[in-house]
């Protein structure tokens, strides 16, 4: 499956990466959609798995799920740079991932052009559909089978999953299903209620509740502290 010998050559630090863990319910919403159409089968690779939030849900639907990431987040997943030319897309039925926004186009091109011909699902911002360069490089040649827009928001914050977080960002699944024509894209909605329907108590093992509120409070406190220049200014005026 995944070649563990291919290690990350860029050696990034966690500060360099866009790591926004996926709420497990958002992955189950996709899998339920695919399962209803009898498209969930066999094996799956999650090449940007972080701490395994998506793998946690995918393993409920696929016979085997391999997770890897360009950075070691301490959860035992192989460190593999999916964009390294030496890394080959494995012979799996599906590649399903939430990539860094800056990597999504490269991931899509690599998987869709792979000789192993897996199906692909990317969780990205809804505005990923925009852009002249992306249209010509991806969509003009390989139209997604579905664009599945979440009707409710999928809250994600950097480096942690907090079920209590909120977001102003809209997300959608872009899906290319092998065996179905890439000639026409069906835009569909994942209706409201996905979080309630697909959340599980066991998901809380991966959660850090209250983290978003703590960060907001710390940011507000930092913003309220006088700047050093203000202190000197007050002394001059005193």
Image (tube, rainbow, N blue to C red):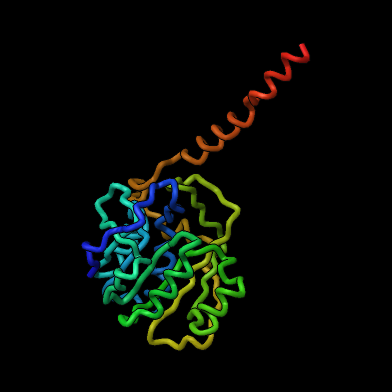
Report whether 79 appears left or right of 14.
Answer: left
Where 225 falls versus 22 (above or below)? Answer: above
The residue located at (52%, 66%) in the rendering is: 172
- Identify the residue at image location x=32%, y=58%: 9
Q: Residue at x 55, y 71 (%)?
A: 189
Name the one closer to the observer, 184 or 189: 184
Taking the view exactly as shown, the residue that stands out farthest to the top is: 238
User: Observer-nearest residue: 39 or 105?
Assistant: 105
| Position in image of residue 154 (x %, y %) | 51, 56
Image quadrant occupied by the N terminus: bottom left
- Camera-nearest residue between 122 and 82: 82
Residue 186 can be seen in this image: no
Identified at 55% across, 48% down, the residue is: 166
Question: Which image quarter holds the C terminus?
Answer: top right
* Left/right of residue 53 with respect to residue 196 in the rendered view: left
Task: Specify the quadrant of the image occupied by residue 57.
Answer: bottom left
User: Does residue 129 lie above or below 152 as drawn?
Assistant: below
């Amino acid at each position: 499956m995944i070649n563990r010998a291919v290690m990350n050559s860029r050696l990034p630090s966690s500060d360099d990466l866009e790591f926004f863990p996926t709420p497990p319910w958002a992955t189950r919403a996709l899998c339920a959609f695919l399962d209803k159409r009898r498209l969930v089968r066999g094996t799956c690779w999650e090449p940007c798995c972080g701490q395994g939030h998506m793998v946690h849900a995918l393993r409920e639907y696929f016979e085997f799920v391999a997770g890897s990431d360009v950075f070691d987040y301490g959860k035992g997943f192989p460190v593999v740079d999916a964009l390294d030319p030496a890394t080959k897309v494995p012979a799996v039925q599906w590649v399903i991932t939430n990539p860094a926004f800056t990597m999504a186009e490269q991931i899509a091109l690599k998987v869709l052009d792979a000789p192993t011909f897996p199906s692909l699902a990317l969780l990205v911002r809804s505005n990923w559909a925009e852009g002249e360069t992306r249209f010509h490089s991806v969509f003009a040649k390989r139209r997604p089978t579905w664009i599945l827009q979440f009707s409710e928001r999928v809250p994600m914050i950097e480096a942690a999953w907090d079920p209590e977080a909120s977001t102003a960002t809209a997300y959608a699944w872009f899906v290319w299903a092998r065996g179905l024509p890439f000639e026409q894209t069906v835009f569909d909605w994942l209706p409201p209620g996905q979080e309630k329907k697909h959340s599980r108590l066991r998901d809380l093992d991966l959660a850090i509740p209250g983290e978003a509120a703590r960060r907001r409070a710390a940011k507000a406190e930092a913003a309220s502290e006088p700047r050093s220049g203000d202190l000197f200014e007050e002394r001059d005026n005193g």
